Amino acid sequence: MVNLQESSDTQAGSTPVEIRDADPPFNHSTADFIFRSRDHVDFRVHKALVSLASPSFDGLLSLPPPITDGIVSINEVKDGLPVIPFPEDQQTLLYLLCSCHGFAPDVLPPLTVQGLKSVCAAHDKYVITAIHPRVHDTFISVAKEDPVAVYAIACHYRMDKLMLAAAKLSLLEPALHLSHSPELGLITGLQYSNLIHYHQECKEVAANFASKDWSWCHSLSDVPLGQATSACPTCRTQLILEPTTVVNGSVLDGNTGKYIFYAPSWWFQFLTDGTTSAKLKETPCGSAIRDRAFLAPVLKKAVSCANVECRLGVPEMLDFCDRFAAAVDEAVSRVRFLRILLRLPYTCLILLRRQVTFPTAYPNT
């Protein structure tokens, strides 16, 4: 005998609870179950989809119904569907089910760091490893605001893709070593040390691009006002190239046997006086080079020449900085991040997880 009771949404002597249905796509009439959040929002879900996405849900929805005195008992049914209460709030459950179902609304509600932490904890709790692209994009939005916190959360919940993205976004944080994010308590000293080491490697690579490595400059057309001969005695300087850094369009000096070309002195000083290297050591990202406040002094020098033609160096310098920034980002992207993560067989991970009390499973009616 199956005892089915439609939900009354009220209990004797208690204040009525308003329960509402979730927005599309989690209100479909072909659903098999209703997952109810702790703040009373009903999500209609398809057993096949959530079971494939989560071994925890697969086991949960496959359990036999509870039996009392020989009678199969279902606590609540709504529109003919078993209702399963969850301890997660509606926002967390929404993100969780987007990953399970493989589709999501065009716009997801924004997350705070704590909201992201709850969503990641739920993915970990229910062993959901595939993250929907829109869910991941929202994670990245949080990481742009607080990359160190998101890095710590991603490390704690073993989300490699998010961890790497947060580590790269943390390059925009000059004072990383001074971070006091409370989420750092989630990770080990070694994992934080890996992030610091990654920053140091990226800083060295980026800084070398300004002072030592010009291999990305392939021809004189890449140099603002670069020419094989001196066109202006006021602002141009002769540059002598090493054999390993020959630029297409430069000319061979018969006296020295080395290749030379001419470029504005302000451009050469921009790369070699230490200011740009220091900037990239502070923030090893191409965006540091594109910063107009940082470029203001060199652009001011570019327009100070009395020769009108030399003032055309301003737009050429801006184009150069775009190429320079792209080269820095490309070089930094090749820096290997040392990942020291928990790597154990799947069964061991399950055994190591904290004890989780799942809601009671009910059969499809």
Image (cartoon, rainbow, N blue to C red):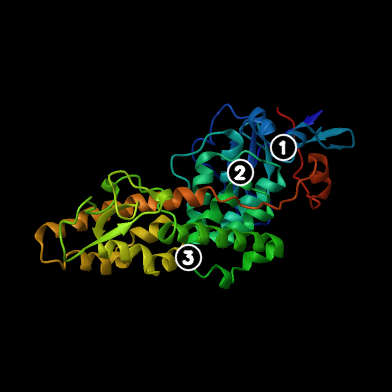
Instruction: Give the CA distance from mark 2 to mark 1.
Output: 12 Å
- Secondary structure at badge 3 equals helix
> Which quarter of the rendered picture does the N terminus lie within?
top right
Q: Is residue 32 above or below residue 252?
A: above
Asked if the residues shown at circle 2 and circle 3 are in contact, with their CB atoms under 8 angstroms apart, the answer is no
Mark nearer the viewer, 2 or 3: 3
Asked if the residues shown at circle 1 and circle 3 are in contact, with their CB atoms under 8 angstroms apart, the answer is no
Q: Is residue 19 left or right of residue 61?
A: left
Task: Name the kind of residue labelled 1 in the image.
Answer: Phe
Question: In the rendering, at what x and y percent does residue 129 appear?
Answer: 66, 40
Question: In the rendering, at what x and y percent does residue 184 appear?
Answer: 64, 65
Instruction: Give the CA distance from mark 1 to mark 3.
Output: 48 Å
From the viewer's side, name the closer residue of 330 and 19: 330
The numbered mark, 1 or 3, whose residue comes first in the sequence reads 1
From the viewer's side, name the closer residue of 161 and 115: 161
Mark nearer the viewer, 1 or 3: 3
Crowding around mark 2 (Cα neighbors within 10 Å: few <14, some 14 to 19, many 20+) is many
Crowding around mark 1 (Cα neighbors within 10 Å: few <14, some 14 to 19, many 20+) is many
Q: Give the residue pinned by disc 1.
A: 57
Labelled disc at residue 49: none
The numbered mark, 2 or 1, whose residue comes first in the sequence reads 1
Task: Name the kind of residue labelled 2 in the image.
Answer: Leu
- Secondary structure at badge 1 equals helix
- Secondary structure at badge 2 equals helix
Identify the residue at horizontal 68%, vertical 49% (top origin): 158
Q: Is residue 188 visible?
A: no
Q: Give the residue pinned by disc 2.
A: 96
Q: Give the residue pinned by disc 3.
A: 281
